[in-house]
Image (cartoon, grey):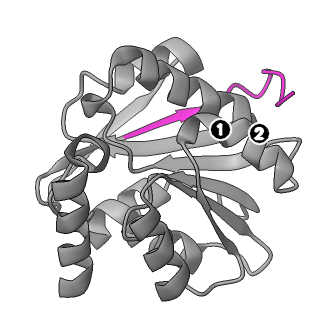
Amino acid sequence: MLTDKLRFLWGFVRHPREVGSITPSSRFLARAVTSHVPSGARAVAELGPGTGPITRVLLERLEPAATVLALEIDAGFCADLRRLLPDARLKVLEAPAQRLPQLASEAGFPTGLDAVVSGLPFANFPPPLRREIVQAAYDALKPGGVFAGYGYAPFALPPLLRSVFGSCRLGYEWRNVPPAFVISARKPASAPGPG
């Protein structure tokens, strides 16, 4: 755990706008975010897994036949995830979140993902990049698919999710340092799938 925290702190020191926090998500926050992933989900993407606290909980929850596509732009975090989480269900991709629809299709999910979870620091991103990432998540989801993430300020992600998904739900996890908002949205069942 201490090693994870040091890795995360080093990631923050190197790329503060991309990492967004000096400490990884707590197990409480990881559980709160992953609780929105539908039971029986077979295709899930994680945006910005960092040192993997949410990834670990996802892998605990998902079935043996599930796949997790973890999109991370930090090469060090990618190497650590591959080394520390040697699970055949986990596919670590050194790629930006905006490429999710293409990467999901290439990974064998052309009809869409069941869920997208995010550990990205949306408040640190310029508004056009926020919208591009949320739109990519929406486009990669199958109808009825779920997006879940967290943030430390309610101004960055919820308005964007309402704009793209039509609505969103906002919760709060006090048992994280710092406490965080947990945000989720569902792609309408009547929406067209990817492609």
Camera-nearest residue between 180 and 86:
86
Q: How many marks?
A: 2
**Mark number displayed over residue 99:** 1
Position of residue 13 measured from the top left corner of the image (x, y, whole percent): 16, 57
Q: Residue at x 84, y 45 (%)?
A: 105
Q: Vertical placement of 181 versus 55: above or below?
A: above
Numbered disc 2: secondary structure: helix
Residue furthest to the left in view is: 178
What's the residue at 41%, 45% (across, down)? 149
User: Three-letter amino acid code at disc 1?
Assistant: Arg
Quadrant including the C terminus? top right
Q: Nearer the viewer, residue 61 or 18?
A: 18
Query: 62 or 68: nearer the eye?
Result: 68
**Predominant secondary structure in magenta?**
loop
State whether residue 38 appears in this view.
yes
Q: Which residues are magenta?
A: 183-195
Question: Which numbered dot is residue 102?
Answer: 2
Between the residue at mark 2 and the residue at mark 1, the CA separation in whole angstroms equals 6 Å
Asked whether residue 1 appears in the rendered view, the answer is no
The amino acid on which the numbered mark 2 sits, given as a three-letter code, is Gln
- Going 41% across and 32% down the picture, which residue do you hit? 169
Residue drawn at 17 percent across, 60 percent down? 176
Res. 129 image quadrant: top left
Look at the numbered discs 2 and 1 and tell me whether their residues touch, using CB distance below 8 Å. yes
Point out which mark residue 135 bears. none
Q: Is residue 194 magenta?
A: yes
